[in-house]
Every structure is written in C-alpha cells, then in structure tokens.
Image (spheres, helix red, strand yellow):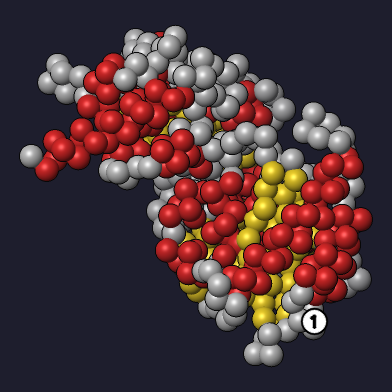
Amino acid sequence: MYPAGFDYLAPQSLDEALGILAERGDEVKILAGGQSLIPMMKLRFARPGTLVDINGIPGLDTIDIQNGHVRVQALARHADVVRSEVIKQENDLMAGAAPWVADPIVRNLGTVCGSLAHHDPEGDWASVMLALDAEVVAVSKEGVAHFHPGADGEQHIGGTRVIPIQEFLVDMFTTSLHPTELLTEVRVPRYERGGGNYQKLERKVGDYATVGVATHIELGDDDRITKAGIALTSVYAHNLKVKEAEQALVGNAPSEELFAEVGRIAASACDPASDNRGSADYKRHMVGLFTERSLAESVKIAQGGQS
Amino acid sequence: MNTTVTINGAAYSADVEPRLLLVDFIRGNAGLTGTHIGCDTTSCGVCTVLLDGTPVKSCTMFAVQANGRSITTVEGLKQNGQLSAMQEAFREHHGLQCGFCTPAMMLVGTALIEENPDPSEDDVRWGISGNLCRCTGYMNIVKAIQAAAEATREGASE
C-alpha cells in the first residue's frame, strides 16, 4: 500500500523546522517515529502535503530531570523510556506502561511525544499523562494567536507554550497544537513518596488495549493519600481522566474498601463499546477490577514494597 | 530525491520518490529479496531489518529516512561465507517451518543477544513478540535463539 505523494523535508535544526512550519504549517505533518502516521498515510486516512522529518535535529532525544520535572523530549523512543534509568528511578507509572506500548520493534522507532500529538483515542500514553497531570511544551517561530474563553478573547502567545495535558488532548485525533507549532517535550512533576502502574488487558502484543487503567498516587507523612491520578484507556470515546475517582482517594488512608469503592466509581464513569475485544459489560467489569488492582499496586510501590 | 543507503556494507544509490517504502528500496532497488513483505500494516514484523543495529519494520519507514544510514538484512548475517551463530542455530534446531518469518526472526534474535547475551525463555518470547510466525513454530525459534546465545557466549570466552 502506498501513501499519496508528499514533499519530504528533513531540517537539521529546530529553527529550520519551525521556519518550515511557519511557512506551510497547514499542510505539514511532523514525522518522528512514524509508527502511527505512516500506517495511516498508507491507508490514506492521512494525506499530508509535506512531511517534516525531525529525526535529523540534534538535542531532541533526551530523557532527564529539569526544574522539578521529568522531561521526555520529542525524539525519545518508547524503547528509550523502557531502558531509561531516570524513568526507573523517577516515575513508576511511566516505567510500568512503556513495555506495554505497541510491540518491541515498533517501540524502537515510535515516540512518546508523537503518540500524544497523534492522540489516538485508544493510545496508552495519553492515559498515563492524564493520570500524572503532565504538561507538553509547544514551540513556534512567531508564537500563535490563542483564544482564551472567559478572558479577553484572542491573545497572542509567545514562541513557547506550556500546555496542561487536559487542555492539549481535545478529542480523538485532535489536540490544541497549532499547525505552526512543534511539540518538543512532555514533562511530568517529580514526587517524593509516590507510586504508580499501568494495567493493560490486550489480546496480543501490539494490539490496542481491551481495557487500560493508569493510576498514580502520592502519600503524605501520615500515610494518607495526598494526590491521586486515574485515567482509563479504550473504554470511552477518548482517554478518560476520572476526576471523581481521584477526589474520592485524596485525604483518605489507603484501604481495600476504599479501592473497591474507587473501582466502582471508575467502572460507572466509563462507557465502553461492545466489539470483538469484548462486551461492554465485560470491559466495565475489568475497569473496576483493574482500578482496584492498580491502586493496591501503586500504594505498595509508594510504601516502598517495590520500586 | 537522491538517496543512498548502505545495506550489508554496500552503498545503494537511487533517485526515489519520498513515498518509496524502505522495504521496496531493499527488495526493488537493491535486489535483496530476503526481506519479506507480510501484512504491510506494521503488525507482522516479517519486513524487519536492522537500522544501525536496531530492529525496525521496513514497511513502516520511507527509504529517504534511511538516507546515509546503515541497514543489515538477512543476506548480511553470514560472516566470511559462513553462517552466523544465529543462522546455524536456526538450522540445527529447526527454527523454521515455512521459512517466511525466518529472516526477521534471525535479525531480531541477533539484535536481542547483542543486548542480552544470556536471555531467558521469557526474554526471548518478549523479544520476538513483535514478529508473527503463521506456522506457530515458536518453540523451536525460541530454542534456536537461546542456542545461538549460548554458542556466542562460548565463542567469546574461548
């Protein structure tokens, strides 16, 4: 299968890439790993006029700690996250989710930032980032005009925007990234005493999740939950952050009863479809079970049972 | 667009359309047909080649992306006219039935034991989980990769 024809540009610097985007942003797709984009182009679901390959831009593949955040840059591959010592030490949810993304060969090319920008509604990373309250950084040459509801309407924002993940992920295959912007990194806040993990039910390696549950919790000195993140994959029209479930956890001491209750909240918040991966009832049941199981595991990790 | 890709140590140049898939550059332009096309949808892994040593699916990459880079295909596994340890182990342990997935399995196995010289059965099964064998002949593929790892370890310690 062959995609429609396109112009191929391979800028060797960020400035050059942003210049191309400023000039022909509307027709551009950014090529990082290409593991979702190229299949979509081959099926002609996507027909970009210009493909801007950013793989030749130096200094965009780092995973590190900066200003109280763990930072994953645009060219860091899923496999880099799997192997990263920084991720192992800093973020249990990301470390736990990375080996479940796609398959080992796709992970060698596909990127975390690319997954977020692509925003397949059944992608794993969006749930992880929603649970972690991540932010993405978008840069452009001239800045973008940005509409702020409730403020003075249209405002001009400078060349770099920091966008909370919930504002970034608008709807399936839709983000708030402007056509002239390049997503350069995703970053998540560091934490003192916390834990997280990702539960994914899949029929086979490389398949979409039948059900996915991401949880992250942080504990205070008194062992009560100070912060909680829960997000679900493949059981709603898009990745679903379950705020009600998060709020039910905060301020409470972890317990089996509490997790069971939060599991029920998550199960009632989701709206899965019956398909060849399972019935809606089955998926809903698994959301409850996985939420309960995932929270127990996250607390165990936070309490030092396993890191 | 002028594109030069080094495949198994030899440079292949061609003026190609940007949409030419890497797998078709390898099979069509370079004439190396050991790299197979299976699903053509990034699922089956039979088109796997090593890009600067790392396994990638060549149906999900454009040839222009490999410009200036180095590719290893199954034809590049043999060393000095001899089968590599991985190829020898696949032969010895009958790590193939129809043979269609074999080039990719051997390349993935080669990259796997490079990174992990002593993989457990789980490590191998996890490592080849992006590659399908429609004959479901996984038992002997796993055995072959583990045997190749052992032979390579022994070869290195001699």
State whether residue B72 is above or below residue A223. above
Name the residue located 40 percent from the left edge and 29 percent from the top edge: B142
Quarter of the image for the N terminus of chain B: give it.
top left
The answer to whether residue B44 is left or right of residue A255 is left
State whether residue B63 is above or below residue A285. above
Name the residue located 73 percent from the left edge and 84 percent from the top edge: A224
| x and y percentages locating residue B148 in the rendered image | 27, 30
From this viewpoint, which residue is outermost toward the bottom? A222
The answer to whether residue A164 is left or right of residue B128 is right
Q: Secondary structure at mark 1?
A: loop
Query: Within 10 angstroms of label 1, few (less than 14), some, or many (20 or more) residues?
Result: some
Quarter of the image for the C terminus of chain B: give it.
top left
State whether residue A262 is above or below residue B60. below
Nearer-the-camera pick, A18 or A190: A190
Name the residue located 14 percent from the left edge and 40 percent from the top edge: B156
**Which residue is the site of mark 1?**
A252
Residue A92 location, quadrant: bottom right
| x and y percentages locating residue A142 in the rendered image | 63, 60
| x and y percentages locating residue B56 in the rendered image | 44, 33
| Residue type, label 1 | Asn
| x and y percentages locating residue B113 in the rendered image | 31, 39
Chain under callout 1: A
Nearer-the-camera pick, B31 or A199: A199
